[in-house]
């Protein structure tokens, strides 16, 4: 249960921020912006944080379920589990978001894929280090 709580809290927060950074990069905002206007970016992020949780909560829980399933496979170590969960989230996010807008290409595919990859790997890492994982039960003989 704690795994899903971690994924539900971290995923939409980090993913929403990365999605905001990606869309501002795609729009050309950073080409005409000075560092003094970065405060506006954070203001927009905190004003839209409720929507990040609204639309990012269920996808984060689905990625948490994939992490939970992979945790029960004994041969998969935590590092490989984080990578597999991240790659799964990368593919889902890239195909979900990269068809938006008039731009298309490898840069857009990778940027939108990172919107899924980074929060899922971060959440999986937090779960591995700070949440006690159940140990497999010994077989009765």
Image (cartoon, rainbow, N blue to C red):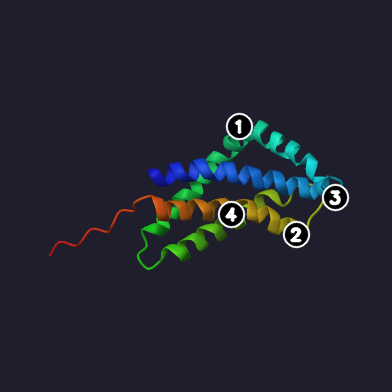
* 139 lies left or right of 89: left
Mark 4 and mark 3 lie on one chain; the one further toward the N terminus is 3
Residue bearing the label numbered 2: 107
**SS class, disc 3:** helix
Mark in front: 2 vs 4: 4
Residue bearing the label numbered 1: 50
Q: Residue furthest bottom?
A: 75
- The residue at 58%/34% (across/down) is 54
Residue bearing the label numbered 3: 31
Query: Residue 70, located in which quarter of the rendered image?
Result: bottom left
- The residue at 63%/51% (across/down) is 115
Q: CA distance from mark 1 to mark 2?
A: 28 Å
**Label 3 environment density (alpha carbons within 10 Å; few <14, some 14–19, many ≥20):** few
Dot 2 and dot 3 residues touching (CB under 8 Å):
no
Question: Could you say where residue 89 lies in the image, as x and y percent from the top left?
Answer: 57, 54
Q: CA distance from mark 2 to mark 4?
A: 16 Å
Q: CA distance from mark 4 to mark 1?
A: 20 Å
Residue bearing the label numbered 4: 118
* 29 lies left or right of 41: right
**SS class, disc 1:** helix
Q: Could you tell me which quadrant the N terminus lies in?
A: top left
């Amino acid at each position: 249960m704690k795994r899903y709580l971690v994924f539900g809290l971290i995923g939409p927060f980090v993913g929403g921020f990365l999605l905001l950074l990606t869309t501002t990069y795609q729009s050309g905002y950073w080409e005409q912006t000075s560092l003094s206007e970065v405060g506006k970016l954070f203001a927009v992020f905190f004003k839209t944080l409720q929507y990040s949780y609204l639309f990012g909560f269920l996808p984060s829980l689905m990625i948490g379920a994939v992490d939970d399933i992979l945790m029960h496979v004994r041969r998969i170590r935590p590092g490989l589990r984080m990578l597999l969960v991240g790659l799964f989230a990368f593919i889902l996010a890239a195909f979900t978001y990269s068809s938006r807008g008039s731009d298309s290409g490898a840069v857009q595919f990778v940027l939108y894929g990172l919107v899924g990859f980074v929060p899922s790997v971060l959440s999986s890492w937090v779960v591995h280090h700070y949440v006690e994982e159940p140990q497999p039960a010994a077989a009765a003989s």
